[in-house]
Amino acid sequence: MADSLPPAVDLDETLNLSFEQSLKSRVFLIQRLSDIVCWPATRIPAHERELAADVLVGLLRTASTELRARCASRLALLADAPKMLLRYLARDEISVARELLETSPALDDSDLLATIRGGVAAHWLAIAARRSLGPLVCEALVGTGDVAVIQAVLRNQGAKLSHGAVDSAVLQSRDAPQIAGLVAKRLETSPAQALTMFWWADHETRVNIMRRFAVDRAVLCDELADLFRMAAVEKWADPETRKAIALLERRQRNRAAADRSPFGSLENAIAAGAQGIDRQLVEEISHLSGIRPQTGHKIFTDRGGEGIAVLCKATGLKRDSLRALWNGLRRPMSDADSPASPFGRVMYVYDLLATAKAQTVLRYWNWSLTSGVVAGDLDTLDPSDLELEFMPARRSAALVFGRRN
């Protein structure tokens, strides 16, 4: 009698069963290795932990999002998590990486910088939300140019902004004015950065800038008093000394210009413009105010007009002269007593500033907007030019007058 044949085997069913078993074993292996890499150093030597982490990285490439997120969540609690595994998960999709990027104490600045370079906006935002951020990380985040990320960094009180990060934020605030108000509030922001940013800031930010950065120059003026006499003996022969002194001199109005002027005084020049102030009269008012015409044109054509209040207070003009100047420039006078109106906002700034502080602001503007610029230079100024880093006046002029992206 012939031997009975073995039962037929369904090959597809066997393969499916084998695949399911392999998946179960893989999930088990990932879970177990995730446990092992999270063990304390007293339980597993460092080199074994690193070996387990290397194997785990290879397995996670084909693991589900849920498994990867679970592993990342556990690693976020470790101060000595294996670096390769940490960096791998930090660059995973944001649902996996967020907790690591926001809280992991094991991520150092080099890890964060690598993630910023290889990441996207969601990862940048997660890093910006960390409790503390070092200067290099802040600079890299601001350098992404993403407005939401820059705002998150500026709002983060644990962020330590470098000078370069603030400079970059100031530059980018020209096209994103909502950044300017946050920059003005940062402790790291310098007077030069704030007073330059004034020109494209909104009214509230301009007021904050005036309150914080309009300061007296009493110490500088006292300590350099001898310099004025020395320069006068030399008949002001050195142009660089003249430019520097223009920032430090106490007297704002130009007496020599008043002696030469057909109007005889700043008040008379303003009164002469009752029917309208043209370009020639702007230049005359500028000379009488002790500033260059280029600075005067910037102040008188500024959309907000708060700079006009600074000029009037710095030169000792009374409120009536400010009103006459505003009228002569054909600015709107409706609801002049309301702080919500253009002239009301200008009067608020006028009343806010002390004369000495207004002079500091006006003299800084005049120095920064003119001393670093030569004739015909404005069209070629590029505020992103790295060579301007140690040329503050020229950089300020480039930011105010230079081309935009």
Image: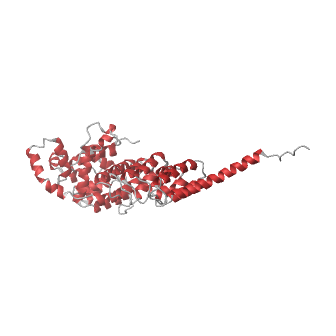
User: Which residue is located at x 65 percent, y 51 percent?
Assistant: 23
In the rendered image, residue 223, in percent from the top left (x then y), is placed at 14, 55
Nearest the viewer among 72 and 177 is 72
**Color encoding of the figure:** secondary structure
User: Which residue is located at x 39 percent, y 52 percent?
Assistant: 138
| For residue 56, side relative to residue 340 (left or right) | right
In the rendered image, residue 97, in percent from the top left (x then y), is placed at 52, 54
Residue, far front:
1
Q: Is residue 271 visible?
A: no
The C terminus lies in quadrant = top left
In the rendered image, residue 347, in percent from the top left (x then y), is placed at 31, 60
Nearest the viewer among 118 and 31 is 31
In the rendered image, residue 90, in percent from the top left (x then y), is placed at 49, 52
| For residue 378, side relative to residue 21 (left or right) | left
Nearest the viewer among 112 and 174 is 112
The N terminus lies in quadrant = top right
Total count of labels: 0
Q: Is residue 28 visible?
A: yes
| For residue 77, side relative to residue 166 (left or right) | right
Residue, far left:
233
What is the quadrant of residue 280 in the picture?
top left
